[in-house]
Amino acid sequence: MKLNHFEKLKPVCPRCLRDRNRQTALKIGSSIQRNGDSIREGILLCPQSDCLMEYPIIDGLPIIIADLRAYVTQHVFSILQRGDLSADMEGLLGDCLGPGSAFDTQRQHLSIYAQSHYEDRDPKAEQGGGASLDESVLSLLENGLELAGERMPGTIVDAGCSVGRSTFALAEKSDDLVLGIDMSFGMLKVAAKILNEGVASYPLRRVGMVYDQREFPLEFEGSEKVDFWVCDATALPFADDQFAFAASLNILDCLQSPYDHLKSLSRILVPGGKTVIASPYDWTAGATPVETWVGGHSQRSVNKGSSEAMLRSLFAGGGHPNEIQDLHMIGEIERLPWTAKLHDRSVVHYQVHLLAAQARA
Ligand SMILES: C[S@@+](CC[C@H](N)C(=O)[O-])C[C@H]1O[C@@H](n2cnc3c(N)ncnc32)[C@H](O)[C@@H]1O
Ligand SMILES: [Zn+2]
């Protein structure tokens, strides 16, 4: 965790925010291991006497989550995962643990997102380092920034950044600090290794449980403006009016409550701040309870089950009873291609809906 980001972004205690609607700035309790101007291992503290929550910083990643016990229990595997085993040994352990294990699921996710974010920079990629970015998250971001138009200066958050490419891209295009947040400790570890060591390292799935470890030097201009934190996009631990721009690329259909995410975005944006939201609306009950899907059900309702119509209606003037008064839509693109490679012989092609919105000035 970079001290500069901590001081400028002033994260608040997510427990106080959730339980008491109170915005208490966190303090640095201890820095057990420092590396120049960043903390590699340490503890953040809530100073409120009726809270006193402690949030860990591990491998340079602060975990600022209201239900910390549940988070650590669910992610203990990636938090404690050692990084010193050879690719051969990881592969052998993967075979033992088998398909469906937390280990294999994590490797599949790392493979999909790291390849989609960094294949163009991989010297060994089939395309020889020139993979097309036309259907990548970068292209969604480019289109989103164009749609959003002029941006006011100020800090930027990339919600659900996974392994971080869009966060680095935002830093290349901005003078201000950029924060990538995600709930996946494993994905953020890949992003943090690029940021701190200039090395991309991830397993690339070939077939079944066969992965080729990819490792290559990787640096981005402006990366001194970037940091990565573990935060929940549905309960962002920041004071009101903190960020000038927020990206939310392909995460709406991965959340427990997409509505809470939109509300959280609208709360942390400064008046006049903008956000770009992209989603393929690939709803699954495993990720999002049907009750909170944005469309995708109730075909006979006024929105005829359309996710696009339902999302539009959630913004100011859209007519939804719970519309988010502070965010109004400023543009949209109905369909943009986005692809995810599952393994060497399988690619999923999505058509993403992209929408830009602005916080009321
Ligand atoms: C489909 S991926 C998209 C990643 C990236 N934005 C892209 O477009 O390539 C969804 C991401 O959302 C993250 N995520 C899921 N629930 C989240 C939450 N509550 N808060 C923050 N991130 C979350 C996942 O860990 C994953 O990295
Ligand atoms: Zn607190």
Image (cartoon, helix red, strand yellow):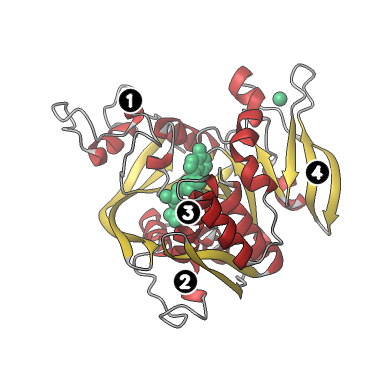
Ligand 1 contact, mark 3 (Cβ < 8 Å): yes
> Could you tell whether 318 is left or right of 64 in the image?
left
Query: Could you tell me the amino acid type at mark 2?
Result: Glu
Numbered label attached to residue 119: 2
Between the C-alphas of marks 1 and 3, the distance is 26 Å
Name the one closer to the observer, 361 or 91. Answer: 91
The tag earlier along the polypeptide, 1 or 4, is: 4
Residue of label 1: 291
Between the C-alphas of marks 2 and 3, the distance is 15 Å
Residue of label 4: 42
Residue of label 3: 109
**Looking at the image, is 143 positioned above or below residue 329?**
below
Numbered label attached to residue 339: none
Q: Tell me the SS state at disc 4.
A: strand
Ligand 1 contact, mark 2 (Cβ < 8 Å): no
The tag earlier along the polypeptide, 1 or 3, is: 3
The tag earlier along the polypeptide, 2 or 1, is: 2
Between the C-alphas of marks 4 and 3, the distance is 28 Å
Query: Could you tell me the amino acid type at mark 1?
Result: Glu
Q: Residues within 10 Å of mark 2 (few under 14, many from 20)?
A: many
User: Which residue is found at the position 63% from the left and 52% from the top?
Assistant: 228
